[in-house]
Amino acid sequence: MSDKEKKIIIPRQLTETGRQTKVETIEIQKKSNKLFIGIPREIIIQENRVALVPSSIATLVAHGHRVVLETGSGEKSNYTDHDFSEAGAEIAYSAKQVYEADIILKVAPPILEEIDLMHPGQILISPLQLPIITAEYIYKLKAKRVIALAMEYIKEDEAGTFPIVRIMSELAGLTAIHTAAELLANTSGGKGVLLGGISGVPSAKVVILGAGIVAEYATRAALGMGAQVRLFENNIYKLKRIQNHVGRHLYTSAINPHYLTQELVTADVAIGAIHSKTGRTPVVVSEEMVSKMKPGSVIVDVSIDQGGCFATSKVTSLDEPTFIKHEVIHYCVPNIASKVSRTASVAVSNILTPILLKTSNGGSSLEHLISANLGLRHGIYIYKGCLTNEYLGKRFHIKSTDLDLLIPSSL
């Protein structure tokens, strides 16, 4: 008997004449909780990551889920179609085939042409990069009546942390310092400064804004290379936490414009590492402050995916990652982790796979899991035609609705 069908045997009671009626079988249909997951090839040129790697796909397929992946999706992360096929994925040769899936996983926001391929009730899990989101983007998702989750706003129930943000932040913090070191070199248009210095030559000064995970890993990398580090953050507890984790005394300060300007004037590198839990990152460095920085100094604004914390920041790409303003080199790539795409792909895949597996363990669909999981619900910004993110509603003057008013009535 198949998993989808079961037969229940119902014995009849004896009749008054003592005869027993025939045993009757009633056929019932068992609702499947298996997922149909689609992974399109990222068509934004500078996006090199893939949402699920072969090892994760093998795990999902072993649990009975179906994964369809567009050909060439893993090439930029050095995974071949053969790798995915051997793991159990179906290889599709058109995006249209992939968008027939119930769940779409992406590591970059879908472009408008991709939204056209979506269908009502579909679940989209992808980043929400605020600088490139438009009102048209929101209206199109609303019109498609999909359920859209922003990866960076998904929370872990137990810890209350943002797992995607955390793992990408670790990568971003390390990569930001390595990138800054490259940009200081003559070959990248810098002044030829070695970040760590050598005997008899002072090391470079690095100013880091924020004291979260990006800041912690940037601090570790900068100190490891021998640079001087200055940390600015208004949350004193976070500053203490970084000092404890790093295991040494650091120069720290609240974000006071006077002290911040003093340090920026003599800094070789400034790292923007401020994360907002709900909307845009606050701008803490004005254009006037940037104009006072040393010619040839470097700004790496990791916060650019939420708008950036430098007034002079604007989104760049891996193809053209930098621009110069006030003689300061700006690096503002929102998907900085794509520089190390294979590592980043494994990291994202490790977060998404357990979330998807919870559905089979719980015996319910992902949509029902969303209703019970506050961490996943925190990531929802579009729910079946309704905008549920208050910040986006205010930004684009679109009516937003509290998600709690929508889910109980529809599930």
Image: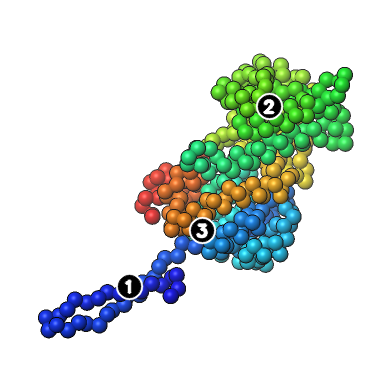
Q: Which mark is residue 16?
A: none
Q: Nearer the viewer, residue 13 or 322?
A: 13
Q: Mark 3 or mark 1, which has the lower sequence index?
A: 1
Q: Quadrant of the C terminus?
A: bottom left
Gap between marks 2 and 3 measured at Cα: 40 Å
Check disc 3 and report its element: helix, strand or loop: loop
**Position in image of residue 405 (x %, y %):** 38, 46
For residue 103, above or below residue 340: below
State which quadrant residue 196 falls in: top right
At label 2, counting other C-alpha atoms closer than 10 Å, the crowd grade (few under 14, some 14-19, many 20 or more) is many
Amino acid carrying label 2: it is: Ile
Residue 263: x, y in percent? Answer: 72, 19
Q: Residue at x 83, y 25 (%)?
A: 197
Q: Position of residue 333 (x, y in %)?
A: 71, 40
Residue sitting farthest toward the front: 18
Disc 1 marks a residue whose amino acid type is Ile
Write down the residue under mark 2: 208
Q: Which residue is mark 1?
A: 8
Residue at image mark 3: 122
Task: Give amino acid for label 3.
Answer: Gln
Q: Nearer the viewer, mark 1 or mark 2?
A: 1
Mark pair 1, 2: CA separation: 66 Å
Left/right placement of residue 349 relative to residue 380 reads: right
Separation of marks 3 and 1 at Cα, in angstroms? 34 Å
Circle nearer the viewer, 3 or 1: 1
At a point 66% along the width and 49% down the height, the residue shown is 346
**Are the residues at dot 2 and dot 3 in contact (C-beta closer than 8 Å)?**
no
Q: Secondary structure at mark 2?
A: strand
Residue 266 appears anywhere in the view: yes
